[in-house]
Image (tube, grey):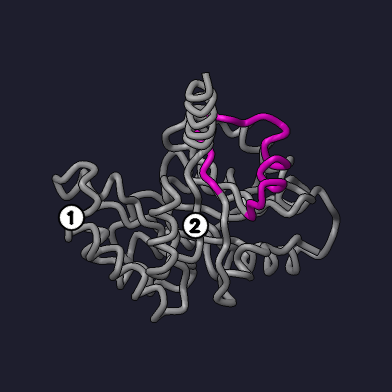
Amino acid sequence: MMRSNPLKQKLAAGGTAYGTMVFEFNSPGLPAALVAAGAEFALYDMEHSGFTMKDMKEQFAYCRGIGLVPVVRPPSKTYATVATLLDIGAMGLMFQMVESAEEAAELVRWTRYPPRGQRGAMFGGAHDDYAPGDVAQKMRGADERTFVLAMIETRKGAENLESILAVDGVDGGHLGQFDLSLSLGIPAQFERPEIQTTIDRLTATCKRLGKTAACMAPTLDTARDWQRRGFRMISYSYDTGLVQDSLSAGIRALKSDT
C-alpha cells in the first residue's frame, strides 16, 4: 500500500497544520528535530536555496516513517522537475507565481497519472518505498496523496485567485506576500490595503471552496493574525530565521544580566 498523506487528509477535513519552511539546513537530523518541535510538515524551498535533487531525495527519506510530510517548492515549473520530485518522494508541491486557471490545471496534470494527468510511470522506487505491489493501486494512492498548492504572489495571480483555486486538484492557495508586494510596486509594505484585501480574498475563497489557505508567517503575531483570518496551513518562520531569532534573544538576555 502507498503511504497516505496525513497532512492532506487533516487539511481536507478542515483541520489546521503547522510546520516551517526550510531554505538552508539539510542535515540528516533536521526532520526528526522538526517533529520533536511539533511540526507536521516541512516546506522545502528549492527555488531560492540551491538545494539539489540529491539533497531532496535524502531529506524525503529522513521524513519517511516519522510522521513529517515533505512538501517542496520546485526550482522551476517544468514537467521534468515535477516528475522527478514526485518520484524521489515529495508528497506535496507548492508552485510559485501561478497566474491563471489554465496554468494551474496544467500543473495539476503533471502530478497525476493517466487518465487524470500525464505523470510518467516509475514504480519500485523512492516514492512507493521500493516495494512491490499492484501498479493500478499505487497509481490511485499516489494521485490521492499528492498535495498541490498554488502560490498567489503576483498581481495577475491575485486578480485570478478565485478561478485558480477552483481548479480540480488544487488543494489550496499559498500566500506569497513578499513577491506580491514587489509585483504591486509596494515592496514589503504588507499593511497596505492591496495586500490585506488579497489576504482576505484568499482565505474567503478557500473557505467557500473547501480548500486550504496556506502561508509563511515570519512572526508569532503575524501567525496569530493570519490564523484568526482563516489560514489553516501555517509555516511558522523558516530555518535560519528561527535560529537567528532564538540565538539573538538568548544573547541579549545574557548580556542584560552582566
Name the residue rendered at 69%, 50% in the picture.
Answer: 122
* Number of callouts: 2
The magenta stretch is 20-40
Label located before the other in sequence (2 or 1) = 1
Is residue 238 visible to us here?
A: yes
Residue 146: give x, y in percent of width and height.
59, 61
Q: Label 2 vs label 1: CA separation?
A: 22 Å
Q: Is residue 128 above or below residue 10?
A: above
Please state if 245 lies on the left or on the right of 124 as rendered: left
Check disc 1 and report the residue beneath it.
Answer: 192
Check disc 2 and report the residue beneath it.
Answer: 234
The amino acid marked with disc number 2 is Ile
The residue nearer to you, when weighing 57 against 15, is: 15
> Does residue 232 show up magenta in the picture?
no
> Does residue 38 show up magenta in the picture?
yes
The residue nearer to you, when weighing 211 against 197, is: 197
Residue 81: give x, y in percent of width and height.
51, 42
Q: What kind of element bears circle 2?
A: strand
